[in-house]
Image: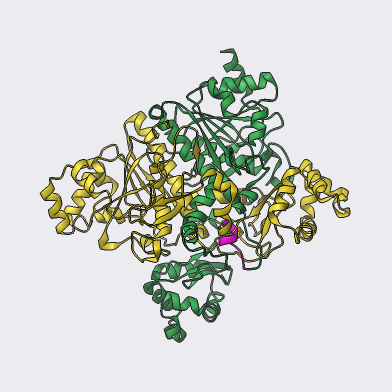
Chain colours: A green, B yellow
């Protein structure tokens, strides 16, 4: 197989759960040598499901498997002098050190940036935590849910008025933090000669979302006028139709904003008379009459399947899509044809499916080819050979 | 003194529009790259037309959210429908390392700016195309909006109140994520280019990148055949409880509380004054708590209902319990943590008004991110066309006059 795009880059990951492991996985997807350092009892994700048949087993966590493909794994007890020395030895010729422990914990272990930078001045250290290394919340305990809701992502954009703001059913803030850590971390390796040295990058998951998502769309207006909005439970309150509607076998994301899209939807729905009425003639007026309009559209959607609605709308020029369930998304012929669903053999889990790389590089294809490491699987080849060699 | 920015030797032509494509340029620009968004007054990017506007004056150089989304990009104006405009665009690409675009598949080819054409003028070009569902495959021409793209990934099907229907996310949550991931993709390809001398055309499917966020639910399908369900704010793989958001005193005020392990459960009991209900032996383990999560959440909701979410956060954190206030938009600007970190910065726009945008959303101990106000349309025309491309003054004036540079 051709060399990966990041061949020659060495990453040491000292992470658990989602953020740092996913960040390091992005490097592993494209051929960097990623060594994952776990405590003797393993990354906490090993004790979290999904497990086959819901039976916990440290080598059978689907979450751990998904986030740690293509990595080599070693165990070190960094609370001991020997373990810490072995980690520093791994860092001595590494390009990146990606970690997500609480700052106070890293200081206790004397693994904070100031304590390790002399071991390798070229090292780019990427710390990804819910709240970051500085600021009044730096020493707070926190997880994805705390970070996501501190960003106003749910309060502004997800949930019904009067009911609780929602996370998205996944680790949104952790993924955003991993995303930012990967881009900025690789930039600092790419431009290390320009900068003149390695450095410490401080990624606060809450801040990333509060900046690029909620901040981007709201903060300028709020700072100027003091006015702000909160969640409505409707996809787009100011234009319509633009929301999720039920259909015969699930839901569709109904969108018909521009005149051509609305006309296309009308055609697909058989040109009902009500769609020609004045109160439905542009997206803003339709939004004002949404309470009257959505039930009329719904009468039609509940008679048809999401796949039919999506196909008919898309063919006619209306961007409505099916809300695919996870299995429907996974089984799409489109993704199969693109090679996005990958099969990997894992020693404990057997033949497994996982997702391919997040983007395609035709000259240097990436994605998972090797399973997540067993606990301490590469201790001999990584730690012992390097410390003796 | 601050160190030079890592990408200062990288130049980018950004044909990206609306949100995701411009954020690729922004990320590279914050890190020091010289980025020119290529746009035209002949068809103003819709993102420039979105309110609110600086000083409430409706003008494509005053859209406040646009400036936050695009800051870090420069801007040149080229009317690509004019053959001479096309030539100018190619001359610019020849001087660039990277081209960014997020139109539908084939749109750049129709303009005469496809990868094969651009490779002729810049053989080791790194080009990123980021349509909804990639450059190939049966769904490649699917049309979505940023906010509905995640419908194709399974993610939307698991966003909602426990057991209820999917609840829409009311903005394009995936756009800035893809913008940042697009910058990572560009840097991966640039790293490879520097080592091998070869550029390439990145096939960035926004669907595939966002589907990674549904990975945990995907694994439950692979391992157990489960469909995935809405779970409110519960832990996505049901491994932690309590794990939720609870209403506090004062209206639309909430607190998030997570207990990840038995030690943190003991800390929460302590913080609550060890009420009778929490002493249930079944709750001493994660498994027992997860099994009875609804009852635990009900008790917590009652306990927090009359408390201030910030004071309660301080109390819980002092015991080591993971808790944080749920912010509203208003809370963001006042938040002491975001203030201390400089998450938001006030800039003076060249037109004279103040605008608040976000700053470098990752902090470096060596450099300050290159954050500037959002770009004015064509603000870099003089430099790019006269100095970088070396157009004689009369030729430049002529192209402006005939609205080729426009």
Quadrant assignment for the C terminus of chain A: top right
Q: Residue at x 51, y 70 (%)?
A: A237
Q: Residue at x 44, y 49 (%)?
A: B179
Question: In which image quadrant can residue B293 be found?
Answer: bottom right
Q: Position of residue B41 (x, y in %)?
A: 26, 60
Question: In which image quadrant can residue B111 be found?
Answer: bottom left
Name above or below for residue A81 compared with residue A212.
above
Name above or below for residue B55 compared with residue B325.
below
For this orientation, the residue located farthest to the front is B352
Question: In which image quadrant can residue B292 be found?
Answer: bottom right
Name above or below for residue B324 compared with residue A11.
below
Span highlighted in magenta in the image: A152-161
In the image, B176 versus A204, the foreground residue is A204
Q: Residue at x 36, y 29 (%)?
A: B195
Q: Please check the rendered image and state whether residue B90 is part of the magenta-colored stretch, yes or no.
A: no
Residue A175 seen anywhere in this rendered image of the structure: no
For this orientation, the residue located farthest to the left is B394
In the image, B141 versus B89, the foreground residue is B89
In the image, A250 versus B159, the foreground residue is B159
Name above or below for residue B301 compared with residue A347.
below
Q: Position of residue A106 (x, y in %)?
A: 64, 31
Q: Position of residue A272 (x, y in %)?
A: 45, 84
Q: Residue at x 20, y 55 (%)?
A: B405
Q: Is residue B254 left or right of residue B280?
A: left
């Amino acid at each position: 197989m051709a060399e990966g795009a990041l061949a020659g880059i060495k990453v040491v990951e000292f992470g658990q759960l989602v953020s740092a492991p996913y960040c390091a996985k992005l490097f592993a997807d494209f051929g960097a040598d990623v060594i994952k350092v776990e405590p003797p009892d393993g990354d906490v994700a090993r004790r979290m499901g999904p497990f086959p048949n819901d039976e916990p087993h440290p080598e059978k966590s689907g979450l751990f498997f998904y986030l740690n493909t293509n990595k080599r794994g070693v165990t070190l007890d960094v609370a001991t002098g020997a373990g810490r020395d072995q980690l520093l030895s791994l860092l001595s010729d590494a390009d990146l050190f990606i970690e997500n422990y609480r700052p106070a914990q890293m200081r206790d272990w004397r693994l904070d940036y100031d304590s390790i930078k002399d071991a390798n001045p070229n090292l780019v250290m990427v710390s990804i935590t819910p709240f970051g290394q500085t600021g009044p919340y730096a020493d707070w305990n926190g997880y994805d849910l705390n970070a996501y809701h501190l960003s106003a992502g749910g309060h502004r954009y997800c949930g019904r008025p009067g009911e609780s703001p929602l996370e998205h059913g996944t680790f949104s803030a952790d993924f955003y933090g991993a995303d930012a850590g990967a881009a900025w971390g690789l930039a600092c390796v790419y431009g290390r000669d320009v900068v003149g040295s390695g450095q410490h990058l401080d990624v606060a998951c809450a801040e990333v979302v509060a900046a690029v998502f909620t901040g981007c769309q709201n903060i300028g207006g709020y700072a100027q006028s003091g006015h702000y909005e909160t969640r409505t439970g409707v996809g787009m309150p100011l234009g319509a139709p633009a929301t999720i509607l039920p259909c015969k076998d699930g839901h569709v994301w109904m969108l018909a904003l521009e005149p051509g899209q609305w006309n296309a939807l009308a055609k697909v729905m058989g040109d009902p008379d009500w769609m020609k009425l004045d109160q439905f003639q542009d997206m803003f007026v339709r939004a004002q009459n949404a309470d009257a309009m959505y039930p009329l559209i719904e009468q039609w959607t509940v008679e048809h399947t999401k796949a039919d609605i999506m196909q008919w709308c898309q063919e006619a020029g209306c961007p409505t899509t099916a809300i695919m369930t996870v299995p429907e998304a996974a089984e799409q012929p489109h993704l199969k044809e693109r090679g996005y669903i990958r099969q990997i053999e894992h020693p404990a889990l057997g033949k497994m499916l996982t997702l391919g790389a997040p983007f395609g590089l035709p000259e240097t294809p990436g994605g998972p080819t090797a399973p997540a490491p067993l606990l301490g699987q590469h201790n001999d080849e990584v730690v012992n050979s390097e410390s003796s060699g | 003194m601050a160190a030079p920015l890592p990408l200062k030797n990288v130049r980018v032509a950004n044909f990206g529009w609306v949100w995701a494509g411009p954020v690729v340029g922004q990320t590279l620009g914050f890190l020091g790259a010289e980025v020119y968004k290529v746009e035209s007054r002949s068809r103003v990017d819709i993102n420039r037309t979105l309110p609110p506007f600086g000083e409430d004056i409706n003008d494509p150089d005053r859209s406040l959210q646009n400036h936050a989304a695009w800051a870090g990009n420069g801007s040149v104006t080229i009317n690509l429908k004019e053959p001479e405009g096309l030539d100018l665009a190619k001359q610019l690409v020849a001087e660039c390392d990277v081209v960014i675009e997020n139109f539908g598949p084939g749109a750049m080819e129709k303009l005469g700016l496809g990868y094969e054409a651009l490779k002729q003028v810049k053989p080791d070009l790194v080009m990123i195309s980021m349509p909804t569902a990639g450059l190939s495959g049966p769904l490649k021409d699917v049309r979505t909006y940023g906010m509905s793209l995640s419908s194709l990934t399974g993610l939307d099907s698991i966003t909602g109140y426990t057991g209820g229907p999917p609840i829409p996310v009311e903005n394009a949550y995936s756009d800035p994520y893809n913008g940042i991931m697009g910058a990572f993709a560009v840097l991966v390809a640039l790293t490879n280019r520097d080592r091998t001398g070869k550029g390439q055309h990145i096939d960035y499917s926004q669907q595939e990148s966002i589907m990674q966020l549904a990975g945990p639910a995907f694994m439950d399908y692979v391992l157990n055949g489960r469909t995935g369900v809405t779970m409110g704010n519960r832990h996505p793989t049901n491994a932690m409880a309590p794990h939720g958001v609870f209403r506090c005193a004062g209206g639309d005020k909430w607190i998030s509380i997570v207990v990840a392990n038995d030690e943190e459960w003991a800390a929460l009991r302590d913080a609550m004054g060890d009420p009778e209900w929490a002493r249930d032996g079944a709750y001493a383990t994660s498994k027992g708590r997860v099994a009875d999560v609804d009852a635990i959440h009900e008790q917590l909701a009652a306990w927090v209902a009359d408390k201030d979410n910030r004071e309660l956060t301080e109390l819980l954190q002092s015991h080591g319990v993971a808790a944080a206030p749920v912010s509203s938009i208003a809370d963001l600007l006042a938040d002491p943590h975001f203030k201390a970190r400089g998450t938001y910065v006030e800039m003076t726009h060249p037109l004279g008004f103040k605008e608040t945008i976000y700053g470098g959303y990752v902090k470096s101990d060596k450099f300050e991110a290159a954050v500037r106000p959002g770009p004015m349309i064509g603000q870099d025309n003089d430099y790019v066309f006269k100095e970088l491309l070396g157009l004689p003054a009369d030729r430049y004036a002529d192209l402006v006059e005939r609205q080729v540079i426009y």
